[in-house]
Amino acid sequence: MTDRPSPAPGSRPAASWPLTILASVTLVAALIVAKAFLMPIVLALLLNLVFSPVRRWASRRGVPPGLTSLAVVLVLFVGVGALALALSGPIQDYAQRGPEIAQQVESKLRSVSQMIERVSEAGKQVGEMAAGGDEEAERVVVAGPDPLTMLILSTPAVLAQACFTLILLFFLMSSGDLFYEKIVQAAPTFADKRRAIGVAYDIERKLSRYFATITVINFGLGAAIGIALWVLGMPNPLLFGVMGALLNFVPFIGAVLGMLLTFAIGIVTFDMLGQAALVAGVYFGLTAIEGQFVTPYAVGRRLELNPVIVFIAVAFWGWAWSVIGMFIAVPVLIAIRVFCENAERLQTVAIFLAGAEPEREPEPSKTAGAGR
């Protein structure tokens, strides 16, 4: 009877790879199916990590955790509610004029490029052929709920998820360090307890620093965008400033989407396409300055991530969880990177998630130093 060779240390049995793939596919499917339930939970957990230093700072000064959590929830509720109330008018106006804005943008762009006109005419011919020449049938196919109706219909679900997030955040913050105590109790050895609590505090500290820094930067960017577009004559500069600040939480895609929306409204607002291109260029220029100079300097290399992985993560979470997914993509990556940095077997993953290392100057050789 021959003895089978033992697997090399650290190698994974071949049979486990299909199970790993199956588990990954199941996890992704579960994330997509249960997104309506999981999104507010993930948001509440992230907000709890962000505001935990505030709660702990207040506790050291004798303020009960319940009172601090109530104050944080009320500030978030009042702030978001006041902002939504202030911007509800322009948002409803643009949503109601959505088809009209799209038609004006299309007509102005068509006058610039003959190629766009040919493609449009070809599309109309294909539509007529598919409809069989029946105008009423074509009207039935094209007709649908306008953007304002869709916005009104989606408002109750958004409000319910927001309330669930704030309520869960209140309970998480009111519990104090209960979750950290449970982590310590669950770890088997003293070394494991120390490592687990160290990882938890490291994730909390870096996420708090990231959110605080990015929030200040994005509010500054939003103010700069609002002032610049107000000077250039754009309507509702406050709306565009808030839009720029919020979209800047989404790397890469947020700046491009904001620029396209600014360009579309600029086309409707101004008579000349050059003016619309100017406001869009100013918007994109401000976001480029922020992304290339301000954020890398303020955030630091300790929180830099691989831009390719960031783009893939934003695309994946946007596909799975829509807008909320794009907002949480970077914080989730930061938490995963910190966890991998503190796990010996996941050091390779942490290196892969990290940004580019700064170039080091070559050290002088010992021979050259001895000959001096």
Image: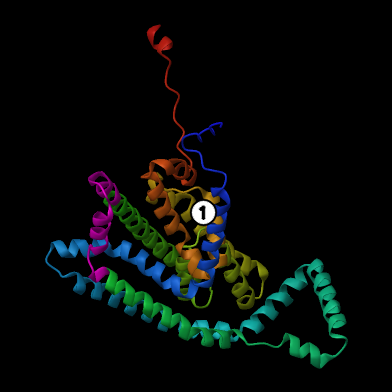
Q: Please state if 44 lies on the left or on the right of 279 as rendered.
A: left
Q: Position of residue 313 (x, y in %)?
A: 53, 57
- Residue lying at 31% horizontally and 56% vertically, measured from the top left: 204
Residue 335 occupies quadrant: bottom left
Examine the rendering and report whether any part of residue 68 can be seen.
Answer: yes
Q: Please state if 292 lies on the left or on the right of 65 as rendered.
A: right
The extreme top residue here reads: 371
Examine the rendering and report whether any part of residue 283 can be seen.
Answer: no
- Residue lying at 49% horizontally and 62% vertically, measured from the top left: 250
Q: Position of residue 19 (x, y in %)?
A: 55, 54
Residue type beneath disc 1: Val
| Circle 1 SS class | helix
Please tell me whether residue 270 belongs to the stretch shown in magenta.
Answer: no
Residue 343 occupies quadrant: top left
243 and 50: which one is in front?
50
Q: Please state if 261 lies on the left or on the right of 114 as rendered.
A: left
Residue 365 occupies quadrant: top left
Q: Main secondary structure of the magenta part?
A: helix
Q: Quadrant of the N terminus?
A: top right
* Number of numbered callouts drawn: 1
Which residue bears the numbered disc 1? 310
Q: Quadrant of the C terminus?
A: top left
Q: Please state if 153 lies on the left or on the right of 220 as rendered.
A: right
Q: Position of residue 42 (x, y in %)?
A: 41, 67
**Residue range (magenta):** 173-196
The extreme front residue here reads: 1
The vertical placement of 283 against 272, above or below, is: above
Q: Position of residue 45 (x, y in %)?
A: 35, 66
